[in-house]
Image (spheres, helix red, strand yellow):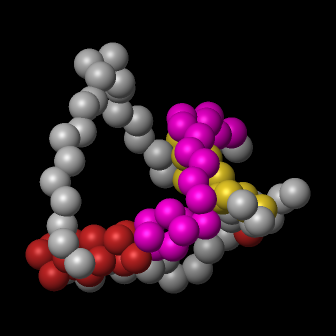
Amino acid sequence: MTQKEITVNVPGSLDPVYSNMIQIAFRDDEFTLMFLHQIPNINQAKAKAIVTISPKHAKKLLLVLDQSVKEFESKFGTIEQPTEQKANESVTMRGYS
């Protein structure tokens, strides 16, 4: 497999966003990722971006994210998992039709 170089054009009007939560929904032909920002201790989150991708791209995202996390950890150390998750912290949606 050969690597292809591509040029990515980022519009000057495109602002970066910060997300500390994500909702994931899927159906047979797509995955939808809603990136959210929740301010600590407030029971409310604001959607910052919604991205819909094909199942093949979702699988590729999983693989490249795994590789990126491994590279990050080799450079900066292990990312610790939270010891426990409170019930109200779980906002991931799975499945829709």
Residue at 50% of width from left, 63% of height from top? 57
* Residue pictured at 77% horizontal, 62% vertical: 27
Q: Is residue 88 left or right of residue 55?
A: right
Q: Is residue 7 above or below residue 13?
A: below
Give the position of the C terminus as an image quadrant: bottom right
Residue 85 percent location from the top left of the image: 62, 74
Kindly give the residue lying farthest to the right in the view shown. 97
Vertically, is 3 above or below 37?
below
Q: Residue at x 35, y 33 (%)?
A: 16
In the picture, residue 31 is in which quadrant? bottom right
Image position, residue 4 (x, y; %): 19, 60
| Front-most of residues 20 and 10 | 10
- Does the magenta-highlighted stretch encompass residue 55? yes
Vertical side of 10 occupied by 82: above or below = below
Locate residue 35 relative to residue 8 in the image: left or right: right
Which corner quadrant holds the N terminus?
bottom left
Q: Residue 29 is drawn in which quadrant?
A: bottom right
> How many labels were placed on the picture?
0
Residue 8 horizontal side relative to residue 82, left or right: left
Q: Position of residue 76 (x, y in %)?
A: 15, 73
**The furthest residue to the left:** 75
Picture layout, residue 52 above or below residue 11 = below
Q: Is residue 27 visible?
A: yes
Q: Is residue 21 magenta?
A: no
Residue that appears at 44% across and 66% down: 61
- Residue 56 is situated, as x and y percent measured from the top left of the image, at 54, 68
Residue furthest out toward the front: 1
Of 91 and 33, nearer the camera is 33
Q: Which residues are magenta?
A: 44-62
**49 left or right, relative to 91:** left
Of 29 and 32, nearer the camera is 29
* Residue at the top extreme of this rendering: 13
